[in-house]
Image: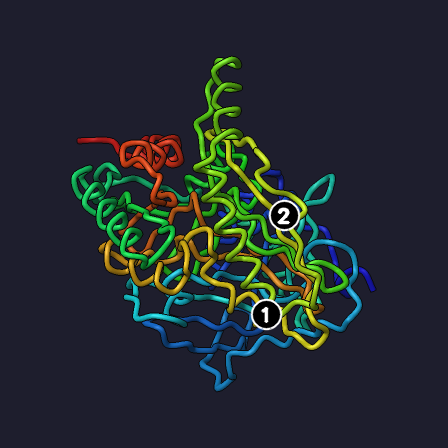
Amino acid sequence: MTEALYHRPLKFESRLVADLLSALKTLDHLVYLNNNGQPFIACCAQEYFIAQTSQIQSFKRTGIEHYQPSPSEFNLAIDALKTPQENGFRGGYVGFIGYDYAAQQYIQYPDRPQPGLFIGQFPSYIKPIPDGWMFYSDDPQAEQIFNHIQNLLNQDKIHPTFHLKNPCTSRWAKSVYTQAFQKIQDYIVAGDCYQINLTQEFKGRAQGSLLATAQAFWTLTEAPYAGYLRIGDFELLSCSPELFIDFEKNRKIITKPIKGTMPRYTDPVLDEQSKQTLKASEKDQAENVMIVDLLRNDLSVYAETGSVKTPKLFNIESFNQVHHMVSEVEATLKADINPFEVLMSALPGGSITGAPKIRAMQIIAELEGAARGAYCGSMGYFNFDGTGSWNILIRSIQKYQEDVSLWAGGGITISSDCDAEYQECFDKVSAMLDLLNTWYQPK
């Protein structure tokens, strides 16, 4: 069977995913993913797991929009030996794992006061079709869920609003960044680490929903790993360029770490010069290969002997605001391995920690001064057969109650220049920050 048992077209006039998400805003939770051009919306989970202050709770659906606490253990029933069907999401598990939750597997790390993990079991989902939207479901209540969603879509459209109470600005002055940078250099010289991914937070206060900004951000970034998630008063908007792990057919897995960044320019000559500078950068190549080696080690624990390979090294990929240096590592999982175990073990991703990973995370906890929250975690999905796709949550905005933040950073090595690394943060985030601040209207 290649598609869900129950499927019916939905009647909705807009082709914009943000409009569809807005119409479904009253649902208990909502997740949208567009990993590498395969978009879907998941809703009305049969069961979900949520972590806040490191404690996981489970909830089961008792009505279309009613959930009750459940004694279920946090365990994803994935059958990696099941024969995969066609590509993309076909019902399974969808959600995110924040950096905080992932780091706490290994070190003492603070909690941000917001959900740190959400994973739902979703037999119901919506996908775009050439002339609209199609609802799919294997849920026993599929027809009732379809009717409920269609009723929501039929209601008068009240679009969400959003405005900043103050501009979103860096939590750090440059002098604070410089002190953290120098401390990392001292750690490297002392032999504690080879590379640290130092990031800084840009924060503000806001009212309304991030969903009101989503379409503008997705248009700005054209991110290949975009998404949106809402649970209660927590929202996560992904404009990520980075794949963490693709879980493909025949137990094949692929990771594509990004290390190395140069800005884009409207002048084609300057833009090409920037690209070639990155391509020839020995510093960025050294930084990139450190993370490739770390990820090779992470994956080799679960891979068939001899299957870990690096088919692409130091590729340059160009995005709307920056050029990135991207490598690729692939492997074949052992037959008895649960893919979710691989995902959790490999998180946080090496490209956003540094090397060696555990010591790097300890240094990050010491220097950054605030928990990252969802940032640098992962958002994605698993089908029940173990195939799936998970991103790295960079270029992402998180909102909890009235607190809004986005982050940017880069890998610091012994050859790094403080001014250049500080500027790289802004090369990565300035376009998104400028757009976000258009929602600030001073009185």
* Residue type highlighted by circle 1: Val
Q: Residue at x 48, y 83 (%)?
A: 70
Which residue is tagged 2? 39
| The quarter of the displayed image where residue 43 is located | bottom right
Nearer-the-camera pick, 235 or 53: 53
Name the mark on residue 384: none
| The quarter of the displayed image where residue 190 is located | bottom left
Camera sees residue 187: yes
Is 307 on the left or on the right of 442, as rendered?
Answer: right
* Residue type highlighted by circle 2: Pro
Q: Residue at x 46, y 41 (%)?
A: 214
Which residue is tagged 1? 301
As helix, strand or loop, the secondary structure at mark 2 comes to strand
As helix, strand or loop, the secondary structure at mark 1 comes to loop
Q: Is residue 300 above or below residue 268?
A: below
Q: Count neighbours of disc 1 (C-alpha within 10 A) and say few if under 14, some if 14 to 19, many if 20 or more.
A: some
Q: Residue at x 38, y 50 (%)?
A: 195
**Colour option used:** rainbow
| Pointer 1 or 2: first along the chain | 2
Rendered-image quadrant of the C terminus: top left
Is 378 on the left or on the right of 234, as rendered?
Answer: right
Camera sees residue 90: no
Nearer-the-camera pick, 241 or 367: 367
The location of residue 232, given as percent across then percent down, is 39, 62
